[in-house]
Amino acid sequence: MSEIASLIVGSEKLTSIFGRWPSFHDAEIHDLHLQRGYINPEDQVYEFPLLTVRLHLWLMTRDIDQKGFYVSTKHTLTKMKFYDVDNFRMEGFNHQNAIFGLGIEQRT
């Protein structure tokens, strides 16, 4: 298991499907939701910004189908939540929303 995957709650759901932590290369964002959070010190409530994203990902094989295309398997729609979001940026929203990959880093 990758170092990052070991820090993600529920990461075993994806690693059990793909056999490892996926690269997310060419994954497609179906939707995302930003929630600003809520802070109320009097009640000791500290909910910081949250990003929820649903991604379609799959495993591309080396096999070629009858039409000459690579065969993809293990199509999965997954939901991921990112807590304490800061400095979020998004570019190029369109009908497909394919991403090159997904980088996650832990900050202390």
Image (tube, grey):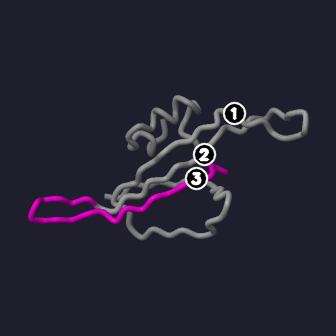
Q: Earlier in the sequence, mark 2 or mark 1?
A: 2
In x, y percent, where is residue 86?
38, 67
Above or below, comparing residue 49 to residue 82 in the picture? below
Residue furthest to the right in view is 67
Please, what secondary structure does the residue beneath circle 1 have?
strand
Left or right, residue 68 beside residue 30: right
In x, y percent, where is residue 41?
13, 65
Q: Quadrant of residue 70?
A: top right
Q: Nearer the viewer, mark 2 or mark 3?
A: 3
Q: Earlier in the sequence, mark 3 or mark 1?
A: 3
What's under tag 2, amino acid-wise? His
Please, what secondary structure does the residue beneath circle 3 have?
strand
In x, y percent, where is residue 38?
25, 63
What's under tag 3, amino acid-wise? His
- Residue at 38% x, 40% y is 9
Query: Looking at this view, is 2 or 49 the one in front?
Result: 49
Whole-Å distance between the Cαs marked 2 and 1?
12 Å
**Residue position marked by numbered label 2 in the rendering:** 56
The residues colored magenta run: 24-47
The reply to whether discs 2 and 3 touch (Cβ–Cβ < 8 Å) is: yes
**Residue position marked by numbered label 3 in the rendering:** 30
Q: Quadrant of residue 61?
A: top right
What's under tag 1, amino acid-wise? Thr
Q: Residues within 10 Å of mark 2 (few under 14, many from 20)?
A: some
Disc on res. 73: 1
